Amino acid sequence: MVRPYAAKGHKRKKSKSERYDKDSEEEEDNAGFVEEEGAQKKLKPGESDEEKAEEAAQELSGIPVSLGGQQGTHKNSPAVIFILEKASLEVAKVGKSYQLLNSEDHANFLKKNNRNPAEYRPDISHQAILNILDSPLNKAGKLRALYVRTEKGVLIEIKPHVRIPRTFKRFAGIMLQLLQKLSISAVGKREKLLRVIKNPVTQYLPVNSLKIGFSHSSEKLVDMHDYVTSVDKDATLVFVVGAMAHGKIECDYIEDFISISGYPLSAAYCITRITNALERKHGIV
């Protein structure tokens, strides 16, 4: 019997809140998205951009975490979590291809679209991520997770053992591919090293965690080593650092706002001070 036309099911459109990678579902929606003026649009990059992204992905083979520090990554053991807020990672169609916007290469494009080029600094996120992943703290197995939340509210999870490209051009290719396909797996493996996940980030944080935000404008000026030493040893420390050129992070989940220097610090150097203090605390050389 032929089914009546009116009885045919309609294809359900995915809502904005569903645009993230799901482990339990097949990756049939790998075209990705970009947010422009409050709306999300499908990305269909040119062949040259896709080839560059695939080439950059070859560097994501992963690096092992030292066996001596594996206890720090245990689910019930004290560990460290980093969250980079307000990261400038936005994709837009420039000419005939989609690109990761940055102030150096797309100044004219940004000005034509009434945007401030100074606010598009993905290199800040690149340097901050490298500082976290390259730290002895991570290599000793004390880094439990790294999350990056973009200015547009896209939440990204980065595995601690991933090997991020050293050059910015390759990093931009990786971020372009990630925001399109929603996840990037290790070469020859099914493990997802980077993926877009569902908000809010608080649902991935342990119950006994202490969320610490950093701002030069905070009246609470502390010595970072003394601060981490005085914290409860059983608490998981969550460090929230702004990955933008100017401004202040405003997150309602932060429990303590501190300043670690009398001078404004870059995100990368702020992270260096944090990791150095934790390495001294745990005796990591």
Image (tube, helix red, strand yellow):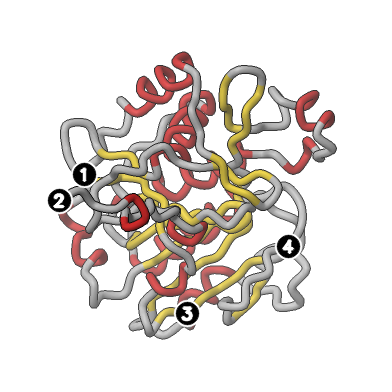
Inspect this view and state whether residue 282 appears: yes
Q: Element at badge 1?
A: loop
Where residue 96 sits: x, y (%)?
60, 17
Mark sitting earlier along the chain (2/1)? 2
Q: Residue at x 30, y 45 (%)?
A: 193
In contact (CB < 8 Å): disc 3 and disc 1: no
The numbered disc on residue 210 is 3
Cα separation, mark 4 vs mark 1, equals 35 Å
Cα separation, mark 3 vs mark 4, equals 19 Å
| Foreground: disc 3 or disc 2 | 2
Q: Residue at x 44, y 55 (%)?
A: 14
**Vertical order, 182 against 101 (above or below):** below
Residue designated by label 4: 248
Q: Residues within 10 Å of mark 4 (few under 14, many from 20)?
A: some
Residue designated by label 1: 64
In the rendered structure, which amino acid carries the disc numbered 1?
Answer: Pro
Q: Residue at x 80, y 34 (%)?
A: 113
Name which quarter of the figure residue 220 lies in: bottom right
Count of numbered tags: 4
| Foreground: disc 4 or disc 2 | 2
Cα separation, mark 2 vs mark 1, equals 59 Å
Where residue 99 sits: x, y (%)?
58, 27
Q: Element at badge 3?
A: strand
Left or right, 142 with reference to 14: left
Residue designated by label 2: 1
| Foreground: disc 3 or disc 4 | 4
